[in-house]
Image: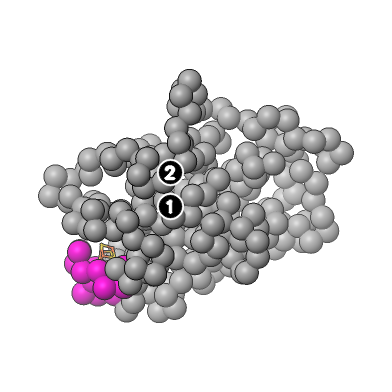
């Protein structure tokens, strides 16, 4: 991957020193990329089909028996407009009583890249859009550095961004298992509609929802996972990176790994 002056400037804005490509995730600017660096995948004898609702297996059981999704069947066949309306009207968990508004998601409906975050914070709750405020600015800078944007662009450049939870937990507390389970069908349907080529899971709760894993981000990042057949890369949430800037370089490596899978 070669860096334009603009991308180098973006990296400086992020506070990330220019990342030197390694043999695993990048190649010199003058050479084409080799095969995608798939370091850990499900067996490939029978490649899973694209994540269309009809082809996707049933989701794994939620972690809490009392947290069975209430709306799973209801959302399975919804299109974008109906799905957005269903989220806006949802009262399936207690967060409906404390939200200002739901935070559905933004971006290209057929984006090649789909970013999955955790839960809306105060700014997101106010504005109705995921990843705004300082964390959103950092995410935008990182995306720009690899030629991506949340603004209007073709599907290979404009990402789709959604959160695991569509409503803000009060005082930005951690999401509860029941809330995650009840909201999950909406995210599953968004992924099925977008059919992304790469998923970027940002933060612990996005990872829990998509990979059913409680392992720390540090143990899951740096390799390729799969969600319903879609390559998935785990990385740190931008809000965490603002608190722990020493890990920005690792997040940058994760982004480059994801980018290399599509090249
Ligand atoms: S967080 Fe999800 S499940 Fe809970 S009320 Fe909001 S949209 Fe519904």
| Spot occupied by residue 131 in the image (x, y as percentages of width and height) | 49, 66
**Disc nearer the start of the sequence (2/1):** 2
Q: Quadrant of residue 137?
A: bottom right
Q: Which residue is mark 2?
A: 51
Q: Position of residue 205 (x, y in %)?
A: 36, 50
Looking at the rendered structure, the number of numbered marks drawn on it comes to 2
Q: Residue at x 58, y 51 (%)?
A: 112
Q: Quadrant of the C terminus?
A: top right
Whether residue 11 appears in magenta in the rendering, the answer is no
Residue at image point 26% right, 73% down: 89
Q: Is residue 42 above or below residue 68?
A: above
Residue situated in front as seen by the camera: 98 or 80: 80
Q: Position of residue 82 (x, y in %)?
A: 34, 68
Task: Decide if residue 117 is on the left or right side of residue 113.
Answer: left
Residue receiving disc 1: 191
Task: Say left or right for 143 vs 237.
Answer: right
Category of crowding for the residue at label 1, using alpha-carbon neighbours closer than 10 angstroms: few (below 14), some (14–19), many (at least 20):
many
Q: Which residues are magenta?
A: 87-99
**Mark 2 element type:** loop
Rendered position, 40 above or below 181: above
Structural distance between the alpha carbons of marks 2 and 1: 8 Å
């Amino acid at each position: 991957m070669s860096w334009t002056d603009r991308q180098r400037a973006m990296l400086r804005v992020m506070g990330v020193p220019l990342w030197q490509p390694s043999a695993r995730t990048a190649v010199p600017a003058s050479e084409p990329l080799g095969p995608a660096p798939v370091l850990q995948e499900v067996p490939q004898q029978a490649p899973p089909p694209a994540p269309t609702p009809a082809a996707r297996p049933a989701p794994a059981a939620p972690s809490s028996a009392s947290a069975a999704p209430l709306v799973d069947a209801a959302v399975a066949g919804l299109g974008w407009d109906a799905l957005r309306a269903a989220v806006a009207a949802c009262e399936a968990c207690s967060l409906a009583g404390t939200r200002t508004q739901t935070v559905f998601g933004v971006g290209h409906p057929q984006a090649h890249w789909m970013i999955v975050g955790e839960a809306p914070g105060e700014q997101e709750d106010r504005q109705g859009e995921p990843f705004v405020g300082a964390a959103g600015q950092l995410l935008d800078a990182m995306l720009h550095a690899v030629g991506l944007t949340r603004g209007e662009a073709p599907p290979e450049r404009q990402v789709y961004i959604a959160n695991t939870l569509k409503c803000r937990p009060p005082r930005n507390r951690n999401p509860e298992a029941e809330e995650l389970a009840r909201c999950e069908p909406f995210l599953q349907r968004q992924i099925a509609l977008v059919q992304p080529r790469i998923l970027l899971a940002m933060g612990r709760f996005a990872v829990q929802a998509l990979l059913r894993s409680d392992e720390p981000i540090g143990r899951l990042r740096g390799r390729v996972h799969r969600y319903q057949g879609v390559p998935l890369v785990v990385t740190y949430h931008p809000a965490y990176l603002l608190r722990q800037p020493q890990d920005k370089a690792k997040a940058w490596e994760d982004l480059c790994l994801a980018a290399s899978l599509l090249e």
